Amino acid sequence: MAKHSKNETIVNQGVSFEQIGPGESERRKWLIACGAAGGVAAVAGGIPFAVSMAPSEKAKSAGAPVEVDISSIPPGGLKTVEWRGKPVWIVRRTPEMLESLNSLEDKLADPKSARKEIPTPEYAKNSHRSIKPEIFVTVGICSHLGCSPVSKFASGPGSDMGNDWPGGFLCPCHGSTFDVAGRVYANKPAPDNLEVPRHMYLSDSKIVIGRDEKGEA
Ligand code: FES
């Protein structure tokens, strides 16, 4: 570990791997990556993250923030990183994906992210559930029993989800479906939307997960 002043600490090395391109199974790759923890491929994408303020003991024990370079994610692509032992997805949504969010409200269980069981940060309480509309950050764990959904970004007749499927995520365990903002459809086993973790931008190409303007999660 590099040496730093008393108030400066290298707090984490994000373990990440990329999944670029829609339609692939994050879950399978996630499981593979977890099984290969410590392997060269799994850690190669990790980016050390330095914070200027020492985190609290509670935050340190829970797991530190992770810095992520999002510049390589193409439109419609998804990148997975690990934060506090959980898969976090960063999706670069296309204009078409964003457009699909506008006509779904009456089909969703919590379109305005108002439920408090899994609180949504204020900056993500909007229809796209994100700071910048095109970049969506979410924890890839289903709010039902904790399976990891898979992306189903293809829409319409070209998808395997039905002609009126607008694109989103499917939890393969019990069939819960989510839109591309992680909002769960009504009358599904999952009670809540996918979690939006606290995060913020360090630059146009870098975000940090687990910390925002208010401090660490
Ligand atoms: S764990 Fe996702 S629907 Fe049951």
Image (tube, helix red, strand yellow):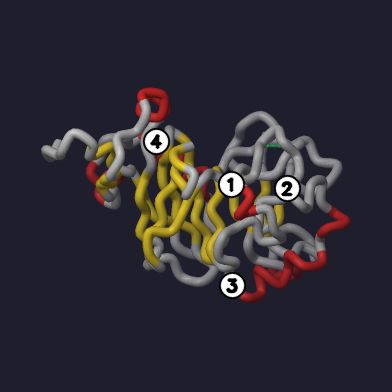
Q: Are marks 1 and 3 in contact (CB under 8 Å)?
A: no
Q: Amino acid at mark 3?
A: Thr
Q: CA distance from mark 2 to mark 1?
A: 10 Å
Tag on residue 34?
A: 4
Going from N to C along the chain, the mark reached first, 2 or 1, is: 2
Q: Amino acid at mark 4?
A: Cys
Q: Amino acid at mark 1?
A: Val
Q: Between 178 and 164, which is closer to the camera in this rendering?
A: 178
Task: Identify the residue position indicated by label 3 in the image.
Answer: 94
Tag on residue 113?
A: 2
Kindly state the secondary structure of the residue where label 1 is placed.
loop
Q: Nearer the viewer, mark 3 or mark 2?
A: 2
Residue 149 vs 134, above or below: the answer is above
User: In which quarter of the view is residue 106 placed?
Assistant: bottom right
The picture places residue 45, in percent across and down from the top left corner, at 29, 52
Going from N to C along the chain, the mark reached first, 4 or 2, is: 4
Task: Identify the residue position indicated by label 1 in the image.
Answer: 196
Q: Between 159 and 207, which is closer to the camera in this rendering?
A: 207
The 10 Å Cα crowd at callout 4, few under 14, some 14 to 19, many 20 or more, is some
The 10 Å Cα crowd at callout 2, few under 14, some 14 to 19, many 20 or more, is many
Q: Amino acid at mark 2?
A: Ser
Mark 3 Cβ and ligand 1 under 8 Å apart: no
